[in-house]
Image (cartoon, rainbow, N blue to C red):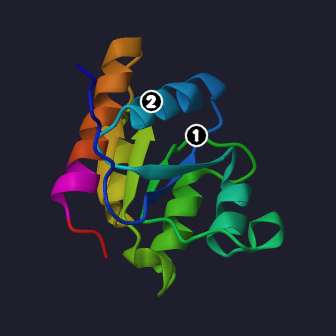
């Protein structure tokens, strides 16, 4: 007896992952590949590259607008806090949900992120399996339960 799989209907959800740690990128890719929602994951490695992607500058002139952004705070060249502030102060970009996914559990980082209108703040666990589980839970909540603009 053959096993049938069903493909989700419609365009894949566009996800922008802003992460400089190659290990965390790989784990996020693996978790999202096994997810319930068809998605297209774009990865940028620093804050400047994230803004180029969002403003469709240079090599990113033909990219699709992300439906959701997974943002690390501790990034090279332009800090994730600055990226969040710029996104949420831009009339067009601020409607994109931003999930901070970071190792920092510092109260000042959490408060600042919410002051800047982050949609969700998640602390990355150091354990491999817990990290995969967190990504899957973020995907399940933000891509199957929440209605994205």
User: Which residue occupies the foreground of this view, 41 or 104?
Assistant: 41
Residue furthest toward the bottom?
Answer: 91
Q: Residues within 10 Å of mark 2 (few under 14, many from 20)?
A: some
User: Which residue occupies the foreground of this view, 70 or 112?
Assistant: 70
Question: Residue at (43%, 76%) from the top-left corner?
Answer: 94
In the rendered structure, does residue 142 fall within the stretch colored magenta? yes
Mark 1 = which residue? 74
Residue furthest toward the left?
Answer: 145
Where, by quadrant of the figure, is residue 64 drawn? bottom right
**101 over 86 or under it: above or below:** above
In the rendered structure, does residue 66 fall within the stretch colored magenta? no
**Part of the protein shown in magenta:** 141-146
Q: Main secondary structure of the magenta part?
A: helix
Residue 134 placed where, x, y %?
Answer: 30, 30
User: Which residue occupies the foreground of this view, 75 or 43?
Assistant: 43
Which structural element holds mark 1?
Answer: loop
Mark 2 = which residue? 103
Residue furthest toward the right?
Answer: 58
Horizontal placement of 76 versus 100: left or right?
right
């Amino acid at each position: 007896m053959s096993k049938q799989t069903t493909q989700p209907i419609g365009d894949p959800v566009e996800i922008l992952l802003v992460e400089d740690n190659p290990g965390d990128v790989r784990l996020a890719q693996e978790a999202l590949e096994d997810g319930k929602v068809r998605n297209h994951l774009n990865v940028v490695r620093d804050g400047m590259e994230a803004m180029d992607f969002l403003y469709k500058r240079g090599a990113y002139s033909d990219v699709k607008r992300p439906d959701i952004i997974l943002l690390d705070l501790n990034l090279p060249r332009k800090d994730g806090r600055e990226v969040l502030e710029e996104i949420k102060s831009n009339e067009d970009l601020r409607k994109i949900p931003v999930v901070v996914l970071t190792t920092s559990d510092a109260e000042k980082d959490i408060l600042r992120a919410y002051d800047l209108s982050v949609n969700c703040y998640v602390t990355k666990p150091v354990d491999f399996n817990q990290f995969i589980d967190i990504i899957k839970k973020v995907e399940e909540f933000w891509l199957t339960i929440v209605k994205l603009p």
